[in-house]
């Protein structure tokens, strides 16, 4: 996920993540990516809401995703191995006696033993498919797996685990300290664990005549409970260092599987979403991330992912040519696709800045320093202040977090007050944002607001207008066009009164 650091699944979310998710309907996107995998849902939420600001970081993740799209089966296999490793580790009972070295040693051995088959499977995948990947992230990972998990290493680990069962008993040494108390307890390798030539040399030495061959043996009686407890204490002193080292190794391997699952979850989620959109006949593309400081904003066939995932048929996409424009002003007939177009633009920017593909035939844009939304909210009966005050409070909180190079999407903002006051407030806010080098996209029905920018900032603004045919039908397309003073109230009149006339005719026919 990152070239120089790990993916922090539990890290803090941006304070505006909830509003961004609600306004752009990102939860639909997350659910489509994760399906029934609850862990994957948590991972894709964290990855998508922690948008990347550096173009190099976005491109790094895009290259990995490109590899994943070329070899989805291999990536899903890697994820399945990581999941199996984590789940296998959770089946090892650790109990509440982990303060005793013998218990720590036991569960550490069981934990490492449960990982061995998954580590071997990772090495097999790396050996078989490593050459197929070209992105820096995946090729580095697979080279590391092939090198570090070679058969010699795995065989050595298994040999150590067999030895730590102490089939010949525990061999340990100690010294006498003050008051004849034992000190410097050290676990020793058994004879069977030594190399063959070392065993033969030791046997030869032991057959040589020695004057101090006297040894002492003390055998604890089976009914001597105190003696058994003392012997167990001696054993725990001897294996304490080994148990601690083995526990650290087991935790390290378990952490590796957990991190591998977390980082692969995002890419498998991307594969799931790509499959869903492909099945519906929708296009996706890897966007071009621009380094230029001037505004870059263009795309072909941009569409609303959330709408596409919930609609029965392919949705209408729109083209965008806003290079060099810091402001996009969207006006036009009600229910003409303005909000859907704005949402598709916001979704594209979020998807690009987390390293995903974009729901479009093509898309290119600057990486923003932050993506924010200010959408109209439904009336809240429990609000202590008025709706207009609530809008201003949200706006103030957003401005406090905005930085130059950011993006702010407005949808019918400040419509809770009269048109004249709303236009003046919105004009002042948008003007200040543009001066602070903030990119803005604004959906509005306020003609005075849009017309004011058309008169005075036309060269830096792209004006889009929801298309309406002469008969009143909507195409849900947003071609370029200047603001129009009419809100097409006759459409509402026709819809209401034509329906009422038809109902009255039906009543009379009975």
Image (spheres, rainbow, N blue to C red):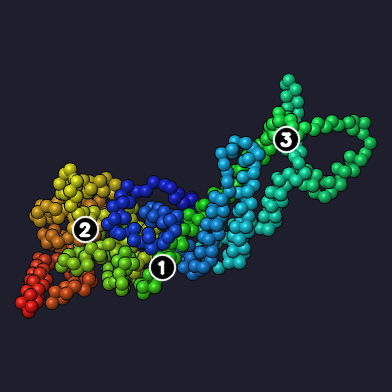
Answer few, some or many: residues within 10 Å of disc 2's Cα (few below 14, many 20 plus, some between 14 and 19): many
- In depth, the one of 348 and 205 nearer the eye is 205
Q: Residue at x 23, y 54 (%)?
A: 374
Q: Nearer the viewer, mark 2 or mark 1?
A: 1
Q: Earlier in the sequence, mark 2 or mark 1?
A: 1
Answer few, some or many: residues within 10 Å of disc 1's Cα (few below 14, many 20 plus, some between 14 and 19): many
Q: Is residue 87 left or right of residue 36?
A: right
Residue 372 in the image: above or below residue 307 = above
Disc 2 designates what residue?
Answer: 411
x then y, percent, for residue 122? 59, 60
Disc 1 designates what residue?
Answer: 274
Q: CA distance from mark 1 to mark 3?
A: 57 Å
Asked if labels 1 and 2 touch by Cβ distance under 8 angstroms, the answer is no
Q: CA distance from mark 2 to mark 1?
A: 28 Å
In what element is the residue under mark 1?
helix
x then y, percent, for residue 458? 18, 63
x then y, percent, for residue 340? 25, 65
Asked if labels 3 and 2 touch by Cβ distance under 8 angstroms, the answer is no
Residue 186: mark? 3
């Amino acid at each position: 996920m990152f070239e120089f650091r790990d993916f922090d699944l539990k890290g803090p979310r941006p304070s505006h993540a909830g509003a961004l998710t609600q306004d752009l309907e990102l939860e639909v996107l997350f659910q489509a990516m994760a399906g029934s995998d609850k862990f994957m849902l948590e991972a894709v939420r964290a990855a998508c809401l922690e948008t990347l600001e550096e173009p190099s970081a976005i491109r790094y993740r895009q290259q990995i995703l490109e590899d994943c799209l070329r070899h989805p089966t291999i990536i899903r296999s890697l994820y399945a191995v990581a999941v199996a490793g984590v789940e296998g580790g959770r089946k090892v009972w650790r109990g509440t006696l982990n303060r005793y070295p013998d218990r720590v040693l036991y569960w550490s051995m069981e934990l490492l033993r449960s990982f061995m088959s998954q580590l071997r499977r990772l090495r097999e995948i790396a050996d078989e498919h490593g050459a197929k990947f070209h992105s820096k992230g995946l090729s580095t990972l697979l080279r590391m797996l092939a090198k570090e998990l070679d058969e010699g290493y795995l065989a050595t680990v298994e040999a150590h685990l067999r030895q730590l069962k102490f089939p010949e008993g525990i061999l340990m040494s100690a010294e006498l300290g003050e008051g004849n108390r034992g000190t410097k307890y050290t676990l020793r390798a058994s004879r069977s664990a030594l190399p063959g030539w070392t065993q033969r040399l030791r046997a030869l030495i032991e057959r040589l005549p020695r004057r101090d061959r006297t040894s002492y043996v003390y055998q604890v009686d089976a009914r001597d409970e105190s003696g058994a407890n003392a012997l167990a204490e001696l054993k725990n002193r001897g294996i304490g260092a080994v148990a601690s080292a083995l526990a650290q190794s087991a935790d390290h391997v378990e952490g590796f599987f957990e991190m591998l699952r977390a980082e692969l979850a995002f890419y498998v989620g991307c594969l799931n979403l790509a499959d869903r959109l492909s099945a519906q006949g929708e296009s996706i593309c890897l966007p071009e991330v621009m380094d230029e400081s001037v505004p870059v904003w263009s795309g072909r066939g941009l569409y609303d992912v959330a709408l596409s995932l919930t609609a029965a048929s392919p949705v209408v996409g729109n083209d965008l040519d806003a290079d060099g424009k810091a402001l996009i002003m969207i006006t036009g007939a009600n229910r003409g696709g303005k909000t859907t177009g704005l949402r598709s633009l916001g979704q594209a920017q979020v998807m690009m800045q987390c390293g995903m593909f974009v729901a479009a035939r093509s898309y290119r844009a600057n990486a923003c320093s932050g993506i924010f939304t200010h959408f109209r909210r439904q009336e809240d009966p429990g609000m202590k202040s008025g709706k207009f005050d609530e809008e201003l409070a949200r706006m103030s909180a957003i401005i406090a977090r905005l930085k130059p190079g950011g993006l702010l999407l407005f949808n019918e903002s400040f419509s809770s007050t009269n048109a004249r006051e709303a236009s003046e407030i919105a004009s002042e806010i948008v003007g200040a944002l543009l001066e602070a080098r903030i990119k803005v996209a604004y959906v509005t029905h306020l003609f005075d607001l849009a017309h004011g920018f058309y008169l005075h900032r036309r060269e830096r603004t792209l004006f889009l207008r929801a298309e309406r045919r002469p008969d009143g039908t909507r195409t849900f397309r947003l071609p370029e066009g200047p603001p129009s003073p009419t809100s097409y109230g006759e459409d509402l009149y026709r819809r209401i009164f034509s329906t009422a006339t038809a109902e009255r005719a039906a009543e009379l026919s009975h």
